[in-house]
Amino acid sequence: MFLRPISLSLALLMTTAPVLAQTAPTPPAVTPTEPRETIEGTLSQDRTVIAIPALATSSVQTVAGLRTDSLGRQIAEVIAADLERSGLYAPVGPSGVRAITRAEVQAPRFADWQARNAENVVHGFVDAGSNGSLIVGCYLYDTALGSELVRKGFEIQPGDWRRAAHKCADAIYSRLSGEAPFFDSRVAYIAESGPKGNRIKRLAIMDSDGGNHRFITNGQALAISPRFSPDYKKIVYVSYLNNRVRVFIYDVASGSQKLVTESGNATFAPRWSPDGTQILYSMAVGGNTDIYRISANGGTPVRLTSTPGIDVGGSFSPDGRKIVFESDRSGSQQVYTMNIDGSNQQRISFGGGRAATPEWSPRGDLIAFTRMGGGEFRIGVMTPSGGSVRMLTNSWQDEAPTWSPNGRVIQFFRTTPGREGKSSLWQVDLTGVNLRRLPTPQDGSDPSWGPVLP
Amino acid sequence: MTIRKSTAMIAAITMLAVGACAKKAPDTLPPVPEGTGTDTGTDTGTGVIPGSQEDFLASVGLEGDRIFFGFDQYNVDSEDMATLQTQAQWLQRNPAVRVTLEGHADERGTRDYNIALGERRANAAKNYLASLGIDPSRISVISYGKERPAELGSTEEAYAKNRRAVTVVIGR
């Protein structure tokens, strides 16, 4: 992947902008190939309207088989979809709004957009760069004030155009919401197919919006519980290869994988430390499961728990100093925290039912978990001391939360009951609204959301 | 999986019995070579290879290859003990046979915990067989958690059937 932020200085703009602005031709509408997302929950009725016309181009050129004018429209579509998915904004366009000229990018006709009730308007351009690259610029304006709020430029390889769109959407989202960005990030998950009693489960990866989907394993061995390394170069997961339960580290670039640790015992439930140097895993010895920590490069594992019973899972705090995990030492699954050396183990979940699969927010302020009780599995959040418990979903079986990089959105998987029961990926805002199903080519489970790409 | 392994075993024994010049598997299976330490008393002439998964299933009876557990439980109760005693008798008659104990959970649990729970259940069964004199080195353990339900429904009856530890013959 190649994406380089560039400064959209006046000089650069002067050299790339033509003297005579031309009207961008309208390319044929792009047929969406992904399944439509399902929207539930209550969206804010006063979402900010943002007009997003297709990005303009100085001159229509074809770079690596991609036309700059077509890309301008596709990038606008991705930006609009990202902002719409956030639940905070009501994007309009690129369909149904007029095309803009290259000259308009820096001189918007604010009255036009105000007339469409747009409080903000996004303008941008896609131009051919040097050596087969593309230059993408995007701007956010306040139509009432007539002021520029965001100006971002990127030099990209043509194949990375979606990343440029996500970066633009992130800049717009951050400027308007005050939150950290999260669109330009990726998700590892398990793609599922086949009958319930003999599911085929494959490791798969995709962008946070479902784009650039790719299957990693072929499904011959059961694959479960993947986690992207913080640099996205590796995925740690559990494979039933050779009818054993073991944690592997898969190298995305080379396609090779290695065992996290050599052991005759089952190892599972792996997680990365925030800096990617350590891995947590659980190991069952004679029916007793405990949590271990090991260097991602191997070496001697450190045993962190030793109580009789099941201690399993685990997720690092973002500062890398604490671990939240689950244990049934009290008689049922509950959530505990401890220091990374295993000291100071404290139960934090109370209040009825079982609590499992804790995941520490990247912001550090909350822990997401699965609450089981009353015939339902629900996703909830609580503070690291167990306070301020809020349930975000309501379903027969929601499970395994994973946080967006900015700690605003939680993905999880939802299973339906019955002989034809299936699992699918969903996400919900931290406030419990904007519940959406994610588009995946097959059924999905065990999502793992990685950090924002640099 | 067990069918495939059994087929492979039959093929292997067939090759052993008729030699490399055999062009075609005989319609009836050849006698088991002597001195393998395998019990031949259960060979009823139905083509079941003593010491095989089929032999095991025929010997232990309907659902005799598995024990069942309560919700979030892993204790071996008196009914389970009777089942495992029958399994142990067969294992004692077939001292060269190795088995895998597969631990399973119902779907109403979280994935990682259910793997740990399946480990507990499989080990509980293994430990009881060991207490009956079965060499634990003959018994390997694997947990499938909730990944491989035997009953596909989402009912209490299905869950009760899925919370199980299943003994599977893997060879000798």
Image (cartoon, helix red, strand yellow):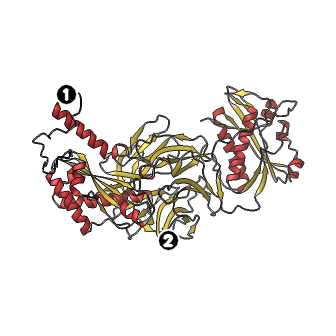
Q: Position of residue A187 (x, y in %)?
A: 55, 47
In what element is the residue under mark 1? loop
**Image mark 1: chain:** B
* Residue at image point 23% right, 62% down: B83
Residue that carries the numbered disc 2 in the rendered image: A374
Q: Position of residue A138 (x, y in %)?
A: 75, 42
Contact? badges 2 and 1 (CB < 8 Å): no
* Residue at image point 87% right, 52% down: A114
Which class describes the residues within 10 Å of circle 1: few (<14), some (14-19), or many (20+)?
few
In what element is the residue under mark 2? loop
B36 on left or right of A249: left
Residue that carries the numbered disc 1 in the rendered image: B20
**Residue A287 visible in image:** no
Q: Amino acid at mark 1?
A: Ala
* Residue at image point 22% right, 48% down: B98
* Residue at image point 23% right, 39% down: B10
**Image mark 2: chain:** A
As measured in the structure, the alpha-carbon distance from the residue carrying label 2 to the one carrying label 1 is 63 Å
